[in-house]
């Protein structure tokens, strides 16, 4: 069964957002790294490769300690990331915290898998760990949305130039500046971007009315 164009574009947009999951604009410029034609989230790039390497390297190296000690060490390594997610930090500190949290997460996963006792105890630990990770991601998402809320487009993704750029596949970022309650897209690359620039922020915007 042939895939229609709308479905194909939707899957493409979903893939792009899965890799970058930030608006492609100046306020988030430091959160996205361009690798060739692909844009990647800097935080995920600092986390998941190290997580996978640690998850594989520890069993292969034969380095083991008791599961409770592995769990305690993993939680300790993840503490900086929890602080960054809750309070924010300069970008380099945030990347360092994610790099430390990656092996910590791997240690927690291995500790749960190797934890002695009945299966329900491992399931309980896995459930608590999943809730904790979800809480960290929720705090991070809340801070991202707050940054978008300070923009004149106020999280209206259908009009946001940074999100339109994902959809349109722009080659270079249209710098977006936030100044005196306004946002302006400079050097638009598509007709959609030009229309968004001409229209400006949607009416009813709290910052626009201020």
Image (cartoon, grey):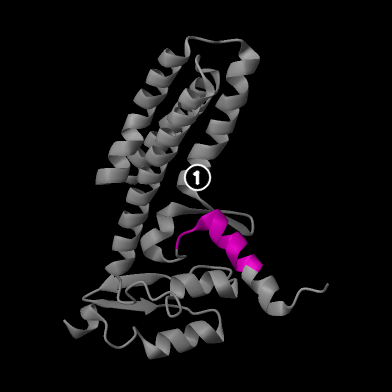
Q: Is residue 185 left or right of residue 33?
A: left
Magenta stretch holds residue 16? yes
Q: Main secondary structure of the magenta part?
A: helix
List x then y, in percent, for residue 4. 74, 78
List x then y, in percent, for residue 46. 49, 39
Q: Which residues are magenta?
A: 11-22
Q: Is residue 95 visible?
A: no
Image quarter where the N terminus lies is bottom right
List x then y, in percent, for residue 121. 46, 24
Return the residue nearer the eye: 72 or 195. 72
Q: Residue at 47%, 78% (x, y): give it.
A: 187
Return the residue nearer the eye: 72 or 159. 72
Image quarter where the C terminus lies is bottom left
The answer to which quarter of the image holds residue 87 is top left
Magenta stretch holds residue 64? no
The answer to which quarter of the image holds residue 68 is top left
Return the residue nearer the eye: 108 or 22. 108
Q: Is residue 133 above or below residue 192?
A: above
Q: Is residue 162 visible?
A: yes
The answer to which quarter of the image holds residue 182 is bottom left
Q: Judging from the image, what secondary structure is the residue with disc 1 in?
A: helix
Q: Residue at 42%, 59% (x, y): give it.
A: 29
Provide the residue designation for mark 1: 44
List x then y, in percent, for residue 38. 61, 57
Q: Residue at 53%, 32% (x, y): give it.
A: 51
Return the residue nearer the eye: 119 or 7. 119
């Amino acid at each position: 069964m042939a895939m229609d164009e709308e479905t194909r574009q939707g899957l493409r947009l979903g893939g792009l957002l899965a890799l970058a999951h930030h608006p492609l604009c100046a306020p988030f410029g430091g959160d996205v790294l361009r690798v060739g034609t692909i844009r990647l989230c800097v935080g995920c790039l600092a986390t998941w490769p190290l997580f996978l390497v640690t998850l594989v390297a520890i069993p292969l190296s034969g380095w083991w300690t008791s599961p409770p000690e592995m769990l305690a060490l993993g939680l300790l390594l993840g503490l900086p990331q929890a602080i960054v997610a809750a309070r924010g930090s300069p970008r380099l500190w945030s990347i360092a915290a994610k790099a430390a949290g990656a092996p910590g997460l791997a240690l927690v996963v291995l500790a749960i898998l190797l934890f002695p006792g009945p299966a329900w105890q491992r399931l309980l630990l896995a459930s608590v760990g999943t809730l904790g990770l979800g809480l960290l991601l929720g705090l991070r998402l809340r801070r991202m949305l707050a940054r978008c809320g300070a923009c004149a487009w106020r999280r209206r993704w259908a009009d946001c130039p940074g999100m339109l750029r994902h959809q349109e596949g722009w080659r270079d970022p249209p710098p977006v500046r936030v100044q005196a309650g306004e946002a302006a897209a400079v050097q638009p690359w598509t007709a959609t971007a030009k229309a968004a620039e001409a229209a400006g922020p949607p009416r009813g915007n709290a910052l626009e009315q201020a």
